[in-house]
Structure formats: C-alpha cells, structure tokens
Image (tube, rainbow, N blue to C red):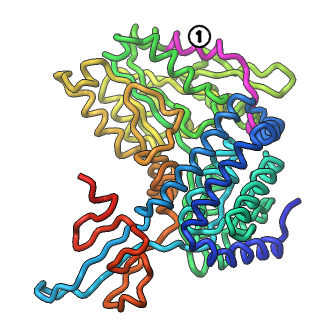
C-alpha cells in the first residue's frame, strides 16, 4: 500500500522522536548486533521471500544475507570503538600568533535519514543494508522507502529491525518503512529529514537529488547512480593471457545476470591477433553462461531495447546476441564490438559510453595507446576502472611505463581502481570506497565500508567551554575512553605505534 503524504509525515515525525534514545552508543551497538542476529535466525524465510520476489536464487541471496549481517556487526564494532566521532582537543596556547583558545571538536548525527532501497540488492543495499546500518551507527533514525520490486522482503526485514530496536531498549520507530513513488518525493522534501541515501538509476537518483537541493533548506543527498566501469587491456597483457582475461571478463559481466552496479560495461582491447583471442574467449564463456532472470520485466525490456539500439549504430557488431526466446522471463548475455575510433569523438556512438543494465559488455578495438587515451578521456565518472596488465607492466618494470601511465589515466575517472582482477564483488572493509565522480555518485562519499558512517555526521567545535558543560566525549578525563587527538597527539586506540 502506497503511503500518503500524511503517512510519510507521521513516519518521519515518529523517527525524529527516536533521536534522543538513539544517542546512547551502547544501545546503538546493541541494536545493530541484534538486527544481525535476527536476520540470521530468520534467514530461511528472508531468503525465500526475497527469491520469490527477485528470482535471484537462494545461493546468491544467502550470501547477500551473510554480507548484510556482517555489515551490521562491523558498524556495531565501530560504534563501540568511537573513532568515527573524530574527537580532537586543542588546549589554549596564548603564545601562538594569533593566540589559540581552548577548542574541542567532534561529530554529531545529522538527524532523520531517508534511505531508498535498491532493486538489485534486496538485503545488502535495501532495508537492512549499508545505508541503514551506517545511519543507525551514526545515531540517525531511518525512514526507508521500500523498492517496489521486493515489498514483502522489505516488510519482513523492517519488522526484524524494529524488533531489534525494542529489544535494545530503543523505540521501534528508530526504523520506519514506507512504500510508493510519491512517498519517495515526500520523504526527501520533508523538513525533518536531514539527509538521504540512494542506490539506483541516474534518472531516479537525479530527480531526488534535485528535489533535495531545491528545498528551502537543502540537505545532503548521497546517491549511487549509473556506472560504466571500463576495463583497459594492454597489448602485452592480451598477448600473455588473452583467454584467461576473456573468460574472467565473461564471468564478471554475467554475474547476477549483469545486474551489479560495477559490471564492466566497456572494454578497451588491442586490435590484432591477441585481441581476437580475447574476444573469442569472452564470447564463448559468456554464451556458455546460459540465460538468467532479470529483476523485473521493465528491466528486461530496457536491456533488450538498449542492446538493440546499440547494435543499430554503424560499425557495431554483435558476436553474441541476447537470447530471449523462452516466453519472456529470461535473457542471455550479449557481447558487442566497435572500433575505438568511433568513441574517440562526440557522436551517436556516445550511447556506448552509457550504462546498459544487464549482461552485456562493449569491446572497443584500439589501434594504439593514443586511441585508448582518447576514449578514456571521454568516459564519464564511474564507480570502478579495471586495468589488465602484463607481468612486467604490473610490476612496474615495463620500460614504456604503461602500467603507471594507465593508472594515472583512470584514477580521475573512478572511485576504485582494480588491477588484474575484476570489479564485481565489493568487499566490506575499512579501506573500501564505493562511489565515484558524477554520474557514478552525487557526492564524494562511499556507501560501502567503515567510512560510510561519515555521510550522516557533521562536526561541531566548542570554544572555551567549561568542563562541566562539555559533552562527555570532549572532557579532559575522557570518561568514555574514546580514541582522540589531543594537542595533535593520538590517544587511546589511535596512539598505537
């Protein structure tokens, strides 16, 4: 049932009222751990519900549930540690020019966060996913707008999170769920919503981003949108292991029926015999994958029309076309090829520089380094960029320095650079970054990894404030035992050599 404007208002106000209890870090950590435990205990029913709505398969969804639980545990550990509060204390020093007063700085939660669930990850990027987990870790109540393709899964997960909240001594409305397209707009425009997180299409994300910016009081909108995720294969790498690269590329392109946000959508390969071998291996392995089910009929239709539109461009060939003759439920993989020169300048082939959601990749044949560089210069911001280098190039012993030059060329394009691997499979780790220049995302933040919590915090500094009035986090005695920097020196966990 779609939420009315009044229902969205009630949901936001209920979440807003939970801010006070959620300020207790011990209860926040308990909530996150209890949510993970409840998801794991209800795994069979959660997976079955998600599979019935998405056809992603029990194996894939079981792995996604484990990832989701791990994210919740990871953020609970962060809450316990407290380093994300970034406590900094500078004692007064009248001898400096200008004199320094007593300054104490830490980070506080923004307020209610609107989370927009993703279609392709009904768990890890939806109701119990990374946006929700990181917002709760920051101390922000959450109102989640359910994705229309898995409403029952959203309801089940929301019920588990609300139960976890009450068992941790927090209001159930620490997490609230709403449904409906109109609810999404009402949510981002609500005056008590302080920030938003989104994973989805460029069109949908940009509409919400613009609505967030158009408010009388604009709010941060952290959107993960479309991404091409280019791959560059050097001539030496192709000569060294063309078949291995082609097979690996096929696996990455078809994983999850090509419905991962870091699916490789464009591959620059050398024109010649080694490139031919790579293309043959890619086509054979992708064709052998067999048909897969996409998340929704509209996505399947958009994929087929997108491939068809691309194959109608001059000089675009399809050594592997998407098989879709099973009555309309599944699609096979597609491989397209094009001379790289067609992409080096603006024109109708710019369509090939846009994401086509589904199991397809475009192989651009490059006649040399200059042509590859010209194409890279035209690729929009992306979540990932992958380099396939030879042994010498990867070790930095290539006299031409191609490895270093390519690394420098793709770094401005992407939030994550992969060397001799594949971008699908985004590890949840403190050093992870899942974001990139627009249109990959609308901010410089990450939606995966420990630093995702920073999106929902803002710094505040207290100057010459008496100890008795300071928050406990900023008092000299450090009653909460937090890691911090005092007069430039690390204390607590940060002080380890």
Residue 289 lies within the magenta run: yes
| Residue receiving disc 1 | 284
Residue stretch rendered in magenta on the structure: 279-299
Task: Answer with left or right where residue 325 lies relative to residue 410.
Answer: right
Residue at 46% x, 39% y: name it: 384
- Picture mark count: 1
Q: In this view, does 221 lie above or below 329?
A: below
Q: Position of residue 497 (x, y in %)?
A: 23, 52
Q: Is mark 1 on a helix, strand or loop?
A: helix
Q: In this view, does 236 lie above or below 435?
A: above
Residue at 77% x, 43% y: name it: 42
Q: Is the magenta stretch mostly helix, strand or loop?
A: helix
Residue at 44% x, 29% y: name it: 231
Q: Is residue 78 visible?
A: yes
Task: Answer with left or right where residue 185 lies relative to residue 486.
Answer: right
Q: Where is residue 363 in the image (x, y as percent from the top left)?
A: 50, 23
Residue at 68% x, 28% y: name it: 308
Nearest to the observer: residue 370 or residue 155: 155
**Which image quarter: residue 417?**
top left
Nearest to the observer: residue 190 or residue 121: 121
Q: Which image quarter holds the N terminus?
A: bottom right
Q: Residues within 10 Å of mark 1 (few under 14, many from 20)?
A: some
Task: Answer with left or right where residue 61 lies relative to residue 267.
Answer: right
Q: Where is residue 183 in the image (x, y as percent from the top left)?
A: 77, 65
């Amino acid at each position: 049932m779609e939420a009315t404007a009044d229902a969205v208002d009630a949901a936001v106000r209920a979440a807003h009222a939970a801010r006070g209890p959620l300020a207790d870090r011990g209860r926040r950590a308990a909530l996150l751990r209890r949510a993970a435990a409840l998801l794991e205990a209800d795994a069979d029913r959660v997976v079955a519900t998600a599979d019935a709505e998405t056809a992603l398969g029990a194996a894939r969804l079981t792995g996604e549930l484990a990832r989701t639980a791990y994210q919740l545990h990871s953020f609970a550990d962060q809450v316990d540690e407290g380093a994300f509060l970034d406590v900094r204390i500078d004692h007064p020093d009248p001898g400096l020019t200008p004199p320094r007063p007593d300054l104490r700085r830490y980070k506080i939660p923004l307020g209610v966060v609107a989370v927009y669930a993703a279609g392709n990850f009904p768990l890890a990027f939806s109701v119990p996913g990374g946006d929700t987990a990181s917002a709760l870790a920051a101390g922000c109540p959450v109102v989640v707008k359910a994705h229309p393709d898995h409403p029952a899964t959203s309801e089940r997960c929301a019920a588990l999170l609300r139960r976890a909240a009450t068992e941790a001594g927090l209001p159930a409305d620490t997490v609230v769920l709403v449904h409906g397209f109109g609810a999404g707009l009402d949510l981002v425009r609500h005056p008590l919503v302080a920030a938003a997180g989104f994973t989805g299409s460029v069109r949908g994300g940009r509409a919400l981003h613009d609505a967030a910016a158009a408010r009388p009081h604009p709010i941060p909108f952290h959107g993960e949108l479309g991404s091409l995720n280019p791959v560059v294969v050097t001539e030496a790498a192709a000569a060294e292991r063309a078949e291995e690269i082609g097979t690996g590329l096929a696996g990455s392109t078809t994983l999850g029926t090509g419905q991962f946000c870091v699916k490789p959508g464009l591959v620059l390969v050398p024109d010649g015999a080694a490139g031919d071998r790579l293309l043959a291996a890619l086509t054979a392995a992708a064709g052998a994958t067999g048909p897969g089910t996409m998340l929704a009929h509209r996505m399947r239709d958009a994929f087929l029309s997108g491939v068809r539109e691309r194959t109608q461009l001059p000089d675009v060939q399809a050594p592997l076309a998407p098989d879709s003759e099973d009555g309309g439920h599944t699609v096979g993989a597609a491989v397209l090829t094009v001379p790289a020169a067609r992409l080096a300048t603006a024109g109708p082939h710019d369509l090939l520089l846009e994401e086509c959601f589904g199991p397809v990749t475009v192989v651009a044949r490059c006649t040399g380094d200059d042509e590859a560089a010209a194409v890279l210069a035209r690729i929009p911001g992306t979540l990932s960029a992958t380099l396939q280098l030879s042994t010498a190039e990867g070790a930095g012993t290539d006299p031409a320095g191609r490895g270093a030059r390519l690394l420098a060329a793709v770094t401005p394009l992407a939030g994550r650079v992969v060397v001799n691997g594949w971008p699908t499979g985004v590890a949840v780790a403190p050093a992870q970054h899942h974001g990139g220049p627009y249109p990959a995302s609308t901010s410089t933040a990450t939606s995966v990894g420990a630093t995702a919590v920073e999106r929902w915090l803002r710094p505040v500094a207290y100057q010459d404030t008496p100890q008795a009035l300071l928050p406990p986090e900023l008092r000299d005695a450090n009653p909460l035992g937090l890691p911090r920097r005092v007069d430039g020196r690390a204390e607590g966990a940060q002080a380890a050599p």
